Amino acid sequence: MTTTSAAKTTILNLPEDELVHPGNRACAGCGLSIIYRIGLKALGRDTILVVPPSCLTVLQGLYPIAATQLPCLNVTFASTAAGATGILGAMRAKKNETTTVAAWAGDGGTSDIGLQALSGACERGENFIFICYDNEAYMNTGVQRSGTTPQGVITTTTPFSGKAQRKKDVPSIIAAHGIPYVATASAAYPLDFFDKITKAKTMKGPKYIHVHTPCPSGWGFHSRFTVKIGALAVETGLFDLYEIENQKFRLTGASEKLIGKKRKPVKEYFKTQSRFKALTDDQMADIQKEIDAKWEGYQQVA
Ligand SMILES: Cc1ncc(C[n+]2csc(CCOP(=O)(O)OP(=O)(O)O)c2C)c(N)n1
Ligand code: SF4
Ligand SMILES: [Mg+2]
């Protein structure tokens, strides 16, 4: 593991150009609204978006009163990466080598129904950026569990003792395709996300960024705590910020700073959200042990 930090964007040099109109149909405090606004600044105006059904479709709204100023292809749930592949083919036919093609999907549309199209596009080496915003359930349709819903979480399809299975590790699955760039990010650290998109834009081939995205409505917390809860997931070592650039893993930003430091107990994160109310003390202790073992591994190679 390397620990070299790249140049960082700050609030002072963030582009002023706004690509999302003020006022949209996302819930108050939505983590997606934060990363979408900042992410589009990083992608820039010369970008075509590809978006499947999700809260993002709702946030964007319908023409002619859409919240987004970029061209966007809305595709079926399973076909985000295939749709992006089609746009790339059209760009090649037009000899356009500058436009960025960015697929932007939820965790359901990425980790479950969209995974085969994404895997195929990664294997073929398509030159696109795929951003998965992970709010850890199918939120748009009423909080059903997805492949990335964590174990023990209450959803409308796991209403009693929570989801039985573990969270699917999508960034690792995508990294196993050997693509040039895989990164994780969090809505609590939007400038880190901005820098990761900016870096991804300089690379050829498939780039994948997985963003932990707190959702007040589905997670059961007040809309004013979005950033605090996103940061807690990182500060407890539960969700880690990292990059895998040309097969080299390194922790970044707030996670890199945690090396050699004391992390907050994960219980602090669980108690902020009603979706974790079925977790027992024993389950929390087991998760804490897993986090400690993972971080022991990080410390050894740091
Ligand atoms: C084939 C198919 N099945 C189901 C749906 C209904 N549907 C629309 S959005 C959605 C949830 C999307 O979840 P996710 O990708 O996690 O995005 P989020 O809503 O959480 O932002 C579902 C199930 C659909 N549009 N197409
Ligand atoms: S349900 Fe969650 S992800 Fe969807 S718009 Fe509301 S806060 Fe955002
Ligand atoms: Mg989701």
Image (cartoon, rainbow, N blue to C red):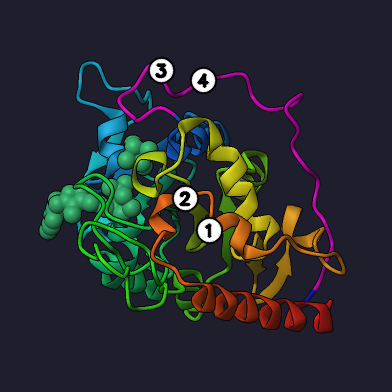
Indicate whether residue 147 is drawn in magenta: no
Contact check, label 1 and label 4, Cβ < 8 Å = no
Q: In the image, what residue type sits under mark 1?
A: Phe
Callout 2: 10 Å neighbours few (<14), some, many (20+)? some
Ligand 2 image-quadrant field: top left
Q: CA distance from mark 2 to mark 4?
A: 32 Å
Q: Pinpoint residue 238: horizontal percent, then vertical percent.
A: 60, 65
Which tag is nearer the camera, tag 3 or tag 2? 2
Look at the picture and state if 252 lies above or below 227.
below
Q: In the image, what residue type sits under mark 3?
A: His
Whether residue 86 is visible, yes or no, is: no
Indicate whether residue 24 is drawn in magenta: yes
What secondary structure is the stretch in magenta mostly built from? loop
Whether residue 101 is visible, yes or no, is: yes
Callout 1: 10 Å neighbours few (<14), some, many (20+)? some
The C terminus is located in which quarter? bottom right
Q: CA distance from mark 4 to mark 3?
A: 7 Å
Callout 3: 10 Å neighbours few (<14), some, many (20+)? few
Q: Which residues are magenta?
A: 2-28
Contact check, label 4 and label 3, Cβ < 8 Å = yes
User: What residue would you read off at disc 3?
Assistant: 21
Look at the picture and state if 206 lies above or below 74.
below
User: What residue would you read off at disc 4?
Assistant: 18
Instruction: Say which of 72 and 2 sits in front.
Output: 2
User: What residue would you read off at disc 1?
Assistant: 270
| Secondary-structure class at tag 4 | loop
Q: Which residue sits at x=27%, y=22%?
A: 66
User: What residue would you read off at disc 2?
Assistant: 273
Callout 4: 10 Å neighbours few (<14), some, many (20+)? some
